[in-house]
Every structure is written in C-alpha cells, then in structure tokens.
Image (spheres, rainbow, N blue to C red):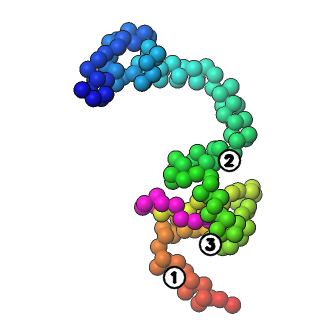
Amino acid sequence: MNSDDVRRTYTKTCSKCLLNKSLDYFYDHTHELRCKACIKEIRRLSYQNNKDRIKARVTEYRKQNPEKIRDTKLKQAYGVGIDYFNNKLKEQSGVCAGCKRDFKNKWRGREVNMALDHDHFTKEPRGILCVKCNRALGLLEENIGTFNNLIEYLNKYKK
C-alpha cells in the first residue's frame, strides 16, 4: 500500500468541525488536528480581524526585502532567481538588450527596474529589457513582420 492509498484509507476526526474525514482532508503535519477547510476558515477570520496589522507588516517586509521579493517572483514566474537576472544583466553590460539604455529608468514618473523578458509560449527567460522595450515587444505580440513594417514606415517618413 503506497502513501496515497494510506491517506485515502485512514481517517481522522477534525477537532473543530468534529467530522471524521480521510487523511487527504488534513495537512501532512501529524500534530495538526484540524482539517484543511477549518484551517482555511480560521485563517480567513484571523485575516479579517487583523487586516490592517497584517497589511502593514507585509508592506514593511516588502520595503525591507525588495531583493527577496524579486527573487521569489522570478522563481514563481520563470523558474529562475535574482542570480540569473543579475548574471544576464551583467552579460548585457547593465543595459537594456533592446534600446541599450541604462539599468535604472523612469516609467510614469518613477524609477523602475528592468524586466526579465521571456518567451510567452515556453515561458523560457531570454534577456533583460527596460519597461518600454518589454511593453513594445508584448504589444506587438513579438511579431517580427510587424516590427519590420514599422521600420519601413519610419524609414519612409524619416527626415
């Protein structure tokens, strides 16, 4: 009998709702006596009662740990961390792969970091782009034909 079969076969009684449920309805922590649904409800109520304090704590953490937040987001979205981003940026001499501008740039009046560009089909990371180049690439749906048409258009009206 494998561990999945064991989880479905054996049951446990939740100390909150008092229902007897299969182990699938409990987290793997052996010390946990409440089912996932009850824990979810407890956390929801706790958040409602402490929303302002929790939001303030999260905001403060994000201010104090921007690199950790960025690392986590990169890992979640693309499977690479801040080290990959920094190495790629170093390969590009600290500039955008598109416009060759400096690392820090302004977008809508505030300073923003560069973006990790990725293939929208495979989710594989490519290079580092500034916000404007990254948005342009996305808005034109990475269509090389459209880019070429725009280049021809600009050349036609060049002064």
Q: Nearer the viewer, mark 3 or mark 2?
A: 2
> Mark number for residue 98?
3
- Indicate the amino acid at tag 3: Gly
- Indicate the amino acid at tag 1: Asn
Q: Are marks 3 and 2 in contact (CB under 8 Å)?
A: no
Q: Do the residues labelled 1 and 2 touch (CB within 8 Å)?
A: no
> Mark number for residue 148?
1
> Mark number for residue 79?
none
* Front in this rendered view, residue 41 or 22: 22
Q: Which of marks 1 and 3 is in front?
A: 3
* Front in this rendered view, residue 130 or 24: 24
* Front in this rendered view, residue 69 or 4: 4
* Front in this rendered view, residue 35 or 155: 35
Residue interval drawn in magenta: 120-131
User: In terms of secondary structure, where does tag 3 sit?
Assistant: loop
Query: In the shown orientation, is residue 60 left or right of residue 150?
Result: right
Mark 3 and mark 2 lie on one chain; the one further toward the N terminus is: 2
Counting from the top left corner in percent of width and height, residue 144 is at 48, 77
* Residue, disc 2: 67
Residue, x 52% and y 78% (percent of image)? 147
Residue, x 74% and y 57% (percent of image)? 111
- Indicate the amino acid at tag 2: Glu
Mark 1 and mark 2 lie on one chain; the one further toward the N terminus is: 2
Asked if 155 appears above or below 75 in the picture, the reply is: below
Counting from the top left corner in percent of width and height, residue 124 is at 48, 60
Q: What is the CA distance from the residue labelled 3 to the residue labelled 2?
A: 24 Å
Asked where in the image residue 95 lies, by quadrant, the reply is: bottom right
User: In terms of secondary structure, where does tag 2 sit?
Assistant: helix
Classify the position of the C terminus by image quarter: bottom right
Q: Nearer the viewer, mark 1 or mark 2?
A: 2
Label 3 crowd (10 A; few <14 / some 14-19 / many >=20): some
